[in-house]
Image (cartoon, grey):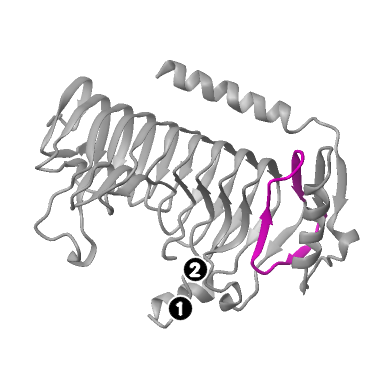
Amino acid sequence: MAKFVVSFVVLSFFYSFHLSNAASTTHNVIKFGAKPDGKTDATQPFLKAWSAACRSATPSTIYVPKGRYLLKAIVFRGPCKNKITVQIGGTLIAPTDYRALGNSGYWILFIETNRVSVFGGTLDAKGAGFWACRKSRQNCPVGAASITFNWANDILISGLTSINSQSTHLVINSCKKVVVRNVRTIAPDQSPNTDGIHVQASTGVSITGSTLQTGDDCISIGPGTRNMLMSGIKCGPGHGISIGSLGKEFNEDGVENIMVTNSVFSGSDNGVRIKSWARPSNGFVRKVVYKNLIMKNVQNPIIIDQNYCPDNKGCPRQTSGVKISQVIYKNIQGTSATAEAVTFDCSPSNPCRGIRLQDIRLTYKNKAATSSCKNVGGTSAGVLMPESCV
């Protein structure tokens, strides 16, 4: 695991040096017809700026000056000839009518792009109208993620703020070597499915120094994710940092080599969670490290839930096939909002194995919290509050 951490330190340094210092040609979106008034549709000017940058044989910068720019659903498509930096000094806003983004599932999409950096700026997806539609159970669109990277490699996202997304703020899907740093995602705690960052089918993702305040998971980790580091995260409100839900499909890629460290959870529904459907699957979770974490009034600071079955549909009387092993919890302290601070509810057909607890100090109303274990095996060491049931 030490080699794993060192590789991310080197990776982060490489991006901060390599992607920020190359001389580049600048393409100002204003010169392509964009107006910073928040009313005039700037979608085509942004696409023209992207096209100019994408076909450039030398590194390019797309510059978005201060102001507000109205964007409809937009696709920045690669591959491109060289590195592209998107420097955002203003705010990108979605149409007030949530239906304008359609059923594509995205607002801003980067697809098949390599060596792209996004610096600064604010994304305002104006999600409240869509949330109201969902709450009233009307015939609503699927909801748009604010910014998505699909099949993209060598990506840096730094200093970006995303507010009031319709659904997930930032999606990283089928990518390699992605650095996310100093990002903020903000949505009300009751806004539905507004995950801060969702990562799936990706390798070598680093998320550091970020503040994630959402109505769903601060970070959610889907199938096929490997070699992922999260450090210096401030999570809450929200549903914590979740691996899963996994195992919805029988044939599903596993999750491996995940680390969450030096992070704080405040008032979140969960702290660190692993969640799988109670149905057959060949998926797995292994080699996960949670260390140096602080919990502040968190409802479920440490939880594995392998009996996820919303609305009791598609999984009653079944058990999870997802195999969970080699998970370390080390130096986790703070306060629980519920009496039971540690919950391991593992699959009876595929018990959790190799779970290790070390130096856990979690209290409830100034007293030791409790723990609960089902179908779990492992070891414990150091100071343990609550007492270990592993």
As drawn, 179 above or below 76: above
Q: Which residue is mark 1?
A: 140
Task: Give the residue drawn at x 84%, y 67%.
Answer: 35
Check disc 2: other Cα within 10 Å, few if <14, some if 14-19, many if 20+.
many
Could you tell me if the residues under marks 2 and 1 are in contact, i.e. CB atoms within 8 Å? yes
Please count the marks in the image: 2
Disc on res. 339: none
Task: Give the residue drawn at x 78%, y 66%.
Answer: 44
Indicate the amino acid at tag 1: Cys
As drawn, 107 above or below 151: below
Asked whether residue 337 is in view, the answer is no
User: In the shown orientation, is residue 325 left or right of residue 26?
Assistant: left
Indicate the amino acid at tag 2: Gly
The span from disc 2 to disc 1 (Cα, nearest Å) is: 8 Å
Quadrant of image for the N terminus: top left
Q: Is residue 74 magenta?
A: yes
User: In the shown orientation, is residue 206 left or right of residue 384?
Assistant: right
As drawn, 212 above or below 333: below
**Who is closer to the viewer here, 223 or 137?**
223
Q: Is residue 324 magenta?
A: no
Task: Give the residue drawn at x 64%, y 24%.
Answer: 13
Q: Position of residue 327 (x, y in %)?
A: 28, 29
Asked whether residue 350 is in view, the answer is yes
Badge 2 marks a residue whose secondary structure is loop
Badge 1 marks a residue whose secondary structure is loop
Magenta region: 65-88
Q: Which residue is mark 2?
A: 143
Q: Position of residue 268 (x, y in %)?
A: 37, 50
